[in-house]
């Protein structure tokens, strides 16, 4: 494993949801609070910030090109050339203080994304599954902060985080129907002041989880045991994903949100982007088929 690289000093307020585009060899991620996303090309060092005009909780790539977003205004397509939003459906339209948070695309090209109370006061979030035919399905309800989601290498187990519960949950996953069952706790976080945030799964089945408030990424085995801990020089580590030509580089996002002036002075890299070559490959990046 190499040394942690401090890639970009972007000072994101709430950097989140990194995604690797294997075709363009670019990394994408969002800054939720600032209503924008970024893309970064490691081969050239070039990056760009793109303002969308609404809070983006998560993004994913479409099979036919461009992006699908889960925003404060619901699900939408985004055209990267014209920079126009095409709104699809907003299942939270009657709840103006809601927004979408994390999400992912499964092996059948379905887009999963969860909502949350923007003020983090009530457990009224919902995990949705948007199918390629445009149908929307409610999967889980009464969530606090719908967060990390991923699947094991053979797509028989889904992992999911509802951050206030401080647990990484595992479910049996039916890839054909897109249904989940048999929820059980895989990992319970006991560190004071720390909650689990985003996650990604590698080709060996390891689960890499960002620890908000914990200044670290932890890799767990499929049995929920701690395999390694990676310290990050930022308290609020938000998410991570694999990328690079060999899919063996871990890209890590962080946040400045909810840190005091004193904390930011002690942790000036908060909100920046990091990278670590970990010697393990990530899984394929699935695209939304709609």
Image: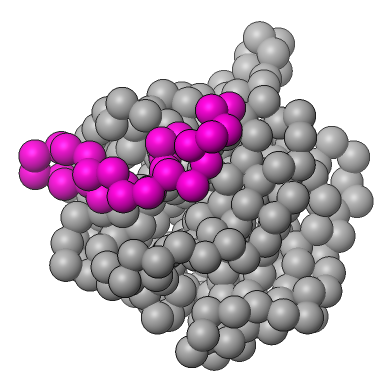
On the image, the x and y values in percent for residue 283 come to 45, 77
Residue 288 versus residue 96 in the image, above or below: below
Q: Which quadrant of the view contains residue 222?
A: bottom right
**Which residue is found at the position 78% from the left and 81% from the top?**
182
On the image, the x and y values in percent for residue 252 come to 51, 49
On the image, the x and y values in percent for residue 284 come to 39, 77
Q: Is residue 182 visible?
A: yes
Q: On the rendered structure, is 216 left or right of 224?
A: left
The one nearer the camera, 47 or 185, is 185
**Which residue is found at the position 65% from the left and 34% from the top?**
117
The one nearer the camera, 237 or 136, is 136
The one nearer the camera, 77 or 237, is 77
Snapshot colouring: one colour
Question: Farthest left residue?
Answer: 82
Q: Which quadrant of the view contains residue 123?
A: top right
Q: Quadrant of the C terminus?
A: bottom left
**Which residue is found at the position 65% from the left and 78% from the top?**
180
Residue 276 versus residue 225 in the image, above or below: above
Q: On the rendered structure, is 280 left or right of 71?
A: right
The one nearer the camera, 250 or 287, is 287
Question: Farthest top residue?
Answer: 261
Q: On the rendered structure, is 287 left or right of 10?
A: left
Q: Is residue 287 visible?
A: no
Q: Magenta part of the protein: which range?
A: 71-97
Residue 254 within the magenta-colored segment of the rendering: no
Q: On the rendered structure, is 127 left or right of 218?
A: left
Q: Quadrant of the N terminus?
A: bottom right
On the image, the x and y values in percent for residue 153 come to 54, 85
Residue 146 versus residue 222 in the image, above or below: above
């Amino acid at each position: 494993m190499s040394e942690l690289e401090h890639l970009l000093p972007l000072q994101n307020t709430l950097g989140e949801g990194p995604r690797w585009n294997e075709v363009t060899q670019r990394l994408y991620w969002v800054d939720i609070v600032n209503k924008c996303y970024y893309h970064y090309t490691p081969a050239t060092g070039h990056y760009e910030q793109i303002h969308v005009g609404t809070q983006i909780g998560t993004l994913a790539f479409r099979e036919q090109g461009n992006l699908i977003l889960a925003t404060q205004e619901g699900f939408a397509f985004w055209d990267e050339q014209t920079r126009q939003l095409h709104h699809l459906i907003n299942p939270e339209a009657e709840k103006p203080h809601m927004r979408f948070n994390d999400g992912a695309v499964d092996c059948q090209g379905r887009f999963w994304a969860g909502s949350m109370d923007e003020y983090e006061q009530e457990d009224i979030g919902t995990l949705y599954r948007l199918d390629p035919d445009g149908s929307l399905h409610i999967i889980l309800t009464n969530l606090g902060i719908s967060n990390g989601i991923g699947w094991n290498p053979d797509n028989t187990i889904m992992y999911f985080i509802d951050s206030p519960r401080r647990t990484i949950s595992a479910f049996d996953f039916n890839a054909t129907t897109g249904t989940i069952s048999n929820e059980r706790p895989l990992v319970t976080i006991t560190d004071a002041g720390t909650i689990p945030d985003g996650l990604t799964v590698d080709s060996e089945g390891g689960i890499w989880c960002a620890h908000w408030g914990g200044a670290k990424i932890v890799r767990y085995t499929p049995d929920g045991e701690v395999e390694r801990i990676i310290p990050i020089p930022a308290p609020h580590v938000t998410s991570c994903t694999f990328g690079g030509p060999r899919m063996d580089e871990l890209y890590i996002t962080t946040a400045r949100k909810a840190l005091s002036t004193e904390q930011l002075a002690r942790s000036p890299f908060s909100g920046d982007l990091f990278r670590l070559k970990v010697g393990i490959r990530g899984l394929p990046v699935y695209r939304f088929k709609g």
